[in-house]
Amino acid sequence: MGNSSFIKPVGIVGHWTAGNVDLQAVLSGVCGLLGGNANLIRVPSDQRAHIEPLLACLAEDDSEGALSSRLAFISFPSDRVDLHEAMARHVDGAMIWGGEEAVRAVRALPFPSWARIAVFGPRYSLALMDALTWSNPATRKTWCDRLARDVWLYEQRACSSPQAIVLERGNEDPREFVRDLADSFRAQNKRVPRRLMEPADALTVLKARADWLLQAQDHTAQMSFAPDWTILVGEGSALPQAAQHRTLVVTIVDRLEEFVASLDGVTQTMGVAVADAEREAALAEQAALRGVDRIVPIGQMHFFNSPWDGQMLVKGMTRTISYARSRHQEEA
């Protein structure tokens, strides 16, 4: 009928990025860039050291400004409300990342009424493993190694970091799994040792250990002497609070399906290791209905891809234009 549609950028996209993931400001900016937009990217002060070397390379390689002319990285204190407001008033779209308090503050800024807003707020991630998988010594160690890598990356501060692994009760003793997981944590700690730990973070880990062991008589733990890594073991379907800093809760349930049925929209990524493909697909379908946005194999929980949090990262900062030809043009 002579109708068509085409894609155009929204214009200027403002990026309010989180400080918990290195180079996240670059990832967010690239999403806006691929949509054809100009991008104004606020970099948290503690992330500047990661961004500035990349900007130096960009300035050297992009001599004609094909990319750099559409990327502006800025940094200012988080309490400068006047600068946040000025930034919001001059954008046509916004990508907002961070914790609950930060997201609420940015969403309250005076954006134009037409601005497209994409929010990537705080989420919780976990892993699932069925009884057949964890009770099989031939494959258990491989899955434990993969889980350890997911735990180590970003110090569990990313929304895609596993805070717990849910084990389905089986005929074998789950202590066999915990022992293998502890071996994987020790090996990963040797490969990627912690160079520095803030006193407040160490206290958080020590408190998490004490609270867990005092909470119930059947709670146990495997841990390093120093607060390098911690595995807390217990039973129950309630999601444990995220302690982060290489602290993982192993919780044992009767059936994975019953646990997945209790999930809500707070869960972002679910790492899975399920022996039966049909059962895994059914669990993924059930988890998707319960608000989980990413279901991936354990070991791939941090693969940054699109969609993210259920949103198409590039398309969200574009406009789809509908064009219907006029009658005069059709007759011509």
Image: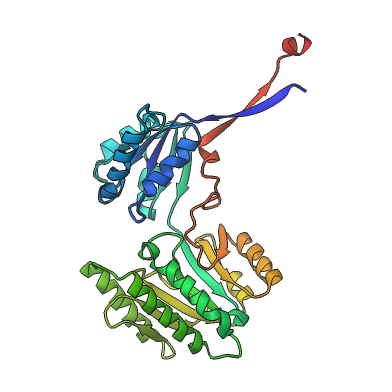
Q: Is residue 132 shown above or below 272?
A: below
Here the colouring is: rainbow
**Front-most of residues 149 and 86:** 149
Which quarter of the image is occupied by the N terminus? top right
Q: Position of residue 74 (x, y in %)?
A: 29, 38
Let me know if residue 305 appears in the view: yes
Q: How many labels does the image show?
A: 0
Let me know if residue 164 appears in the view: no
Q: Where is residue 108 in the image (x, y as percent from the top left)?
A: 38, 42
Q: Where is residue 216 in the image (x, y as percent from the top left)?
A: 41, 87
Residue at image position (53%, 68%) is: 298
**Horizontally, is 68 left or right of 124 in the view?**
left
Q: Is residue 318 shown above or below 232?
A: above
**Front-most of residues 300 and 295:** 300
Residue at image position (48%, 65%) is: 125
Report which quarter residue 201 is drawn in: bottom left
**Front-most of residues 2 and 302:** 302
Q: Is residue 284 shown above or below 310?
A: below
Q: Is residue 109 shown above or below 221?
A: above
Report which quarter residue 215 is drawn in: bottom left
Residue at image position (65%, 65%) is: 286
**Horizontally, is 63 left or right of 32 in the view?**
left
Which quarter of the image is occupied by the C terminus? top right
Q: Position of residue 327 (x, y in %)?
A: 75, 13
**Front-most of residues 134 and 249:** 134
**Horizontally, is 277 left or right of 106 in the view?**
right
